[in-house]
Amino acid sequence: MENRDVKLIEETLSLKRQKNAVILAHNYQLGEVQDIADFVGDSLELSQNAAKSEADVIVFCGVHFMAETASILCPDKVILLPDINAGCPMADMVTTERLRGKKEEFPSAAVVCYVNSSAEVKSESDVCCTSANAVKVIESLNTQEILFVPDQYLGHYVSTKTDKKMVLWPDFCPTHMRIKPEHIIQLRQEYPQAKVVVHPECRPEVIALADKVLSTGGMCRYARRNDVREMVVGTEIGMIHRLRKENPGKKFIPASEQAICPRMKLISLEKVLWSLEEMAPEVKVPEEIRLKAKAAVDKMMKIGRG
Ligand code: 13P
Ligand code: SF4
């Protein structure tokens, strides 16, 4: 490790203690950011961790909707997002205006929103889900018709696991779109012993070629199994850092080196330190929206992991 990093890390950890802060990082964060975090996880695990945290300040190393979810769950804590431009482009694709229009078209449908959505969109939804519990959330609903926003691929994957009638919003994750069936076919030839694990945000043609479809947290648990020695990883490449660190001696092969989420990579060690020094940028969901969004998030939290 470079001297510069050692100094940065020392200053960050000391300031973190002074401010009674906790650092939460998503599995797609840069390795150096994951390594200074108190907890690294998938969207659901990070929300669960934020909800039970006793810290006064949460430094959220992830994207904007994740920091908003922490603000929804912990209104009394200061939620810092070290780079305010770290937004999820898929979450930004659905607006409340367009959602209201769609709800009028399908008045008897329950609205299920993927957690990758703004707090405002959550406030217009009946229940929230993550990639770790989408099927269980949808199966828990009494309604037969579901309006699912914004990820058409996660929605499509869920529709193959349930009898519900699913109306799918047309948006998608531009990072997971980069993983193509030909990548999987090629890697299966190169690594015939490898298990192929993909995220449900991948295209259906990629999902059809996988051994397992899992959230990023699910991938971490699956990788620990004794029968998994080699794994083709069909998600954002930040995932590889944690998998290799936790499983020395096993082989992890990214399905595509192009599967990079540029917004996730906006968070750096320097920005984590600056955010603690300046106590900014802060993410705070306005109370009126928070209360409505919380109803949708709470229902999901009660259901837990799928
Ligand atoms: P996970 O909840 O599986 O970590 O996914 C979050 C995400 O943004 C995937 O692109
Ligand atoms: Fe959003 Fe895709 Fe990035 Fe996840 S990987 S944060 S869904 S753009």
Image (cartoon, rainbow, N blue to C red):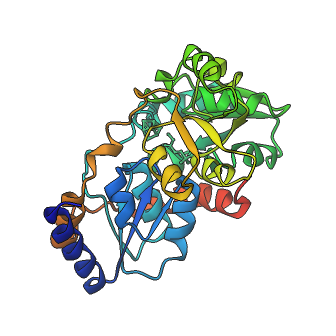
Relative side of 278 to 85, left or right: left
Relative side of 285 to 5, left or right: right
Q: Nearer the viewer, residue 139 or 81?
A: 81
| Ligand 2 sits in quadrant | top left
Q: Nearer the viewer, residue 291 or 264?
A: 264
Which residue, as the protein is rendered here, is positioned at the far front?
A: 249
Q: Pick the quarter of the image with the N terminus.
A: bottom left
Q: Nearer the viewer, residue 204 or 169?
A: 204
Residue at image point 39% right, 59% down: 34
Q: Position of residue 276 (x, y in %)?
A: 22, 71
Q: Position of residue 39 (x, y in %)?
A: 47, 67
Vertical order, 14 against 151 (above or below): below
Name the image quarter holding residue 295. bottom right
User: What is the tally of numbered marks visible in this picture?
Assistant: 0
Residue at image point 35% right, 44% down: 264
Which residue, as the protein is rendered here, is positioned at the far top?
A: 182
Residue at image point 69% right, 44% down: 134
- Asked if residue 285 shows in the view, the reply is no
Residue at image point 40% right, 77% down: 76
Relative side of 4 to 125, left or right: left
- Asked if residue 201 shows in the view, the reply is yes
Q: Position of residue 285 (x, y in %)?
A: 38, 59
Q: Position of residue 245 (x, y in %)?
A: 48, 56
Vertical order, 54 against 299 (above or below): below
Vertical order, 123 against 89 (above or below): below
Relative side of 237 to 253, left or right: left
